[in-house]
Image: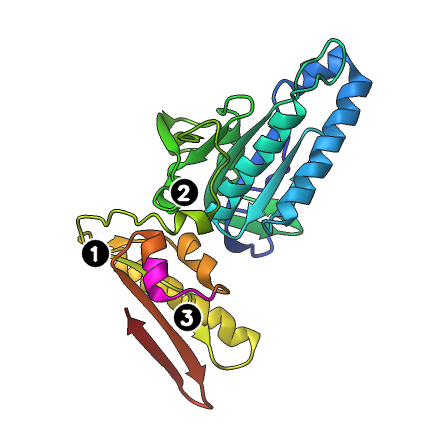
Amino acid sequence: MQAQIVSARPSGMRATRRLAAILSADVKGYSALMAMDEEAIHRTTKSRIDKFLHEMAKFDGKVITLAGDGVLAEFGSAIDALKFAFRIQDKFAALNKRPVAATIGKIEFRIGINVGDLVLHEGAIGGDSANVAVRIESLAEPGGICISRAVFEQVHRVLHLDYTLIGKAQLKNISTPVEVFQVKRRNSERALPMLEEQVARKLTLPGRPSIAVLPFQNLTRGNTEAYFADGVTDDIITGLSRFRELFIIGRNSSFVYRERQVSPQDIARELGVRYILDGNLRQSTERIRVTAHLN
């Protein structure tokens, strides 16, 4: 897939950024398949992409770039992105049990996932984090899934899968080597368990003090305060992560609980941490009051 990706350091108009889980997917060997039976491959790939987009909406995924043979998309959390990746690969595997055409057996997608900043500049979306997702996808097996170290840190304590470190990959146009993991089910015959099914399995706590910071609630109406509340949460996570003796759950994992009515005890069990920090803020004319609770 040739994705339209902007530079991480655009010139001219000031760029804006947002943190996201970025998923890249495309058909392995698409050009060769088209040479075999252009009409059948084009028709089948379009049908698969339509199904991809339909399923992606169920996980609140959004399209960044749409190509003839693939998709670059963003998700609110790494957990949602990886759960979707397994869901759609399951559906494509079932479709591949029937040959596409007389001479063509399968159309297989590769998927790569990364977490990082998306850069928005003059209507285009991209940046180094999106580039990494695209390059990681090229390392995946047909029908397989690869993730970056950043994604692994967000998901491995929540989604019980086989994570195999491929190694540090020197990716094209990326200055720093990226650790890449291949992800498979522990039991290939079993569907990926939903997060709710995994809650019952108590995770082993880390050897050091562990904490997750939930998104602080905004008790003052207004979008400005809502952004400020998220900023307060991010600052706390960043501040705590400086202490090496603490194990801190990443933002993308903790922010999935923004709209979920789950007790702090259940959240701690799901994320495999000992402590939960939550709180709220309210603004008066001249002051902002921030309240935090350690559970």
Q: Alpha carbon of mark 2 to alpha carbon of mark 1: how far? A: 26 Å
| Bounds of the magenta segment | 261-268
* Number of disc labels: 3
The answer to whether the residues at label 1 and label 3 have Cβ atoms under 8 Å apart is no
Q: Which residue is mark 3?
A: 216
Percent of width and height locating residue 98: 70, 19
Q: Quadrant of residue 27?
A: top right
For the residue labelled by badge 2, is the local secondary structure a helix, a strand or a loop? loop
Image depth: mark 2 or mark 1 in front: 2
Q: Earlier in the sequence, mark 1 or mark 3?
A: 3
Disc ID at residue 243: 1
For the residue labelled by badge 3, is the local secondary structure a helix, a strand or a loop? loop
The answer to whether the residues at label 2 and label 1 have Cβ atoms under 8 Å apart is no
Image depth: mark 1 or mark 3 in front: 3
Q: Quadrant of residue 45?
A: top right
In the figure, 50 relative to 235: above or below? above
**In terms of depth relative to the viewer, which is nearer, 24 or 190?**
190
Percent of width and height locating residue 81: 52, 44
Q: Residue at x 35, y 65 (%)?
A: 264
- In the rendered view, does 295 fall on the left or right side of 283? left
Q: Earlier in the sequence, mark 2 or mark 1?
A: 2
* Main secondary structure along the magenta-highlighted residues: helix
Q: Is 254 part of what is drawn in magenta?
A: no
Q: Which residue is mark 2?
A: 159
